[in-house]
Image (cartoon, rainbow, N blue to C red):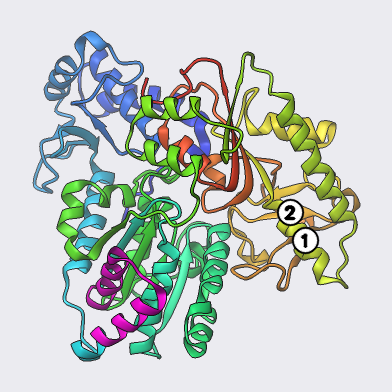
Amino acid sequence: MTAAVPAGRAQQPWHGPLAEAMAEALPRLYGVAPDPLLSELIRALTSALERGELELDLTGPPPDGVSAAAWPAGHGAALKRSGLAAVSSDPADPPAPLVATATGGIAWRRWYEQQESVLAALQERALAPRLELVTAAAQSQVAAEISLRNGLDPQQQRALQALLQHQLVVLGGGPGTGKTSTVVAMLAAVISLNPGLRTWLAAPTGKASSRLKRAIEDRCAVLPESLALALRALPCSTLHRLLESNGERFGRNRNHPLAVDLLVVDEASMLDLNLATALLDALPPQAQLLLVGDPAQLPPVGAGAILSELHRPERWQQLGEAAVELGTTYRNAGAIAGVASLLRHGDRSAVLERLDRLSPADNLSWLRSPTLRLPLELEKRMLEQQRELRRLAEGFSLDDPHTADVLLQQLEAFMVLSPLRRGPWGVEELNRRLLGERFNGGPSRWPPGTPVICTRNQEEADLANGDVGVVVQPSGGAVLFAAAGGRTPAEPKLIHPARLEGAAAAFALTIHKAQGSEYETVCLLMPVTQHPDPRSLYTGLTRARDRCVLITPEGTDWLPGG
């Protein structure tokens, strides 16, 4: 039985009190004398869970709240005296809640061992010989035909070959590097060779799964009609729906495995330890798994960033030919792509230099606000979006599918993103400004045109965490959602607000909630935060399909790495 890992950033207020409680409880429960340095270390390790991290690097800079003068020698000595950390993850070691890692860190032992088990299972799949169903000559011929027809570059061809030869393939790359086009070619190859292959597409959120389905459908035009039809017919869902989650446990497991031969998981950067454990438990031993994602994006809300761990140099090398990183950018060109690339390489000074050189012709602009008050340009643009959504919502008719189409498309025309939920630049305040006194009333009181985001999975309503709809009837009489996993406007759903659990207004979203989504224009707020993370800026920028407006305070404290 595996241990559930706290979902850190989803519930930010807990980590402070929990850190204090753990700092007091662990020494007491294990009969260890109080030690201020040990307490600091436990608090810092607990707070790391907020960032989705199970491990604290003892060779890096001192974390917040830790005595810099004693770091790390004093804290390491206090930890050694306490006996709270095992020197390895050997089950024969005496019971200890922490473990010293091979990379010079300290981690929560039970979760670290669970993570190591998941990573070992993935590596075993990558290196296991795949059962050959066709000859090598047939594979080579199909690979050559698909590569030529789809115009694959050498790295994309490597990815295609990897799926023909390995049970696990990890496909990485930044935005616009052709990950989806490569997946289409990979699927076309394996389905050409085995038309009866049971293939399923999945992603961690409803929005990401719907986007994956549409993206694959859009890229099928280069394929022969029979292959295009086969790919368009592939089922697509959230991982929770695929694994038959009921909120507490998963219906699919090793005793009731998934009926799949190939599972494609997009946006794998959002795959946390709990979900990865459940996925591997339910995946048949001979089934193939294709993980697709950008490791530079924000880690998952829950602890244990599996994709990032796989991209550690030593693990990446161990995966061999089963690991492919795409590097050539084919879309999202311009300043957005340029700054994103610099962020990927951790070059803070170059990011600032590039931002300073932005021109009106660039698809990225930078506004600096001297106060906490938001720029008038942002407020004006948000009001314009609110008015347009209301106009389209009031014109919605069940008898005219086109009205649903244009309304749902408008939701993706513009979005405001922030790393914060609360505060002057937090999404709650932004949504409150537009809804006024109706904000606290929930969707039943919100006017037509108000975007609504689901914050949990609701199987009975066929809604997934992250699905975004829009109020279409006065006084919140109904909320319109696109069909799950399908193409807008096919079979839109009307849901009564009373059926929505934990719904929130979505004129503005946190960057985490926007993962797996794209918008034509993004206004990205980057205030000064306690733990600035370059992945927040990177993820926010790359949500923009056409244009991004970056809004920051004066100075450079908002940019991580200073």
Q: Which residue is mark 1?
A: 406
Q: SS at mark 2? A: helix
- Neighbor class of circle 1 (other Cα within 10 Å; few <14, some 14-19, many 20+) is some
In the rendered image, the quadrant that contains the C terminus is top left
- Residue 258 in view here: no
Picture coordinates of residue 447 (x, y %)? Answer: 86, 45
Horizontal relation, residue 193 to residue 266: left or right = left
Picture coordinates of residue 162 (x, y %)? Answer: 25, 71
Disc 1, disc 2: CB below 8 Å? yes
Q: Is residue 408 above or below residue 229?
A: above
Q: Considering depth in this image, is 356 or 41 the residue closer to the camera? A: 356
Horizontal relation, residue 125 to residue 347: left or right = left
- Residue extent of the magenta highlight: 140-166
Q: Which residue is mark 2?
A: 410
- Neighbor class of circle 2 (other Cα within 10 Å; few <14, some 14-19, many 20+) is some
Quarter-of-image position of residue 419: top right
Which residue type carries mark 1?
Val
- Residue 188 in view here: yes
Picture coordinates of residue 106 (x, y %)? Answer: 21, 33
**Residue at the image position 31 percent from the left and 85 percent from the top:** 142
Q: SS at mark 1? A: helix
**Residue at the image position 16 percent from the left and 14 percent from the top:** 74
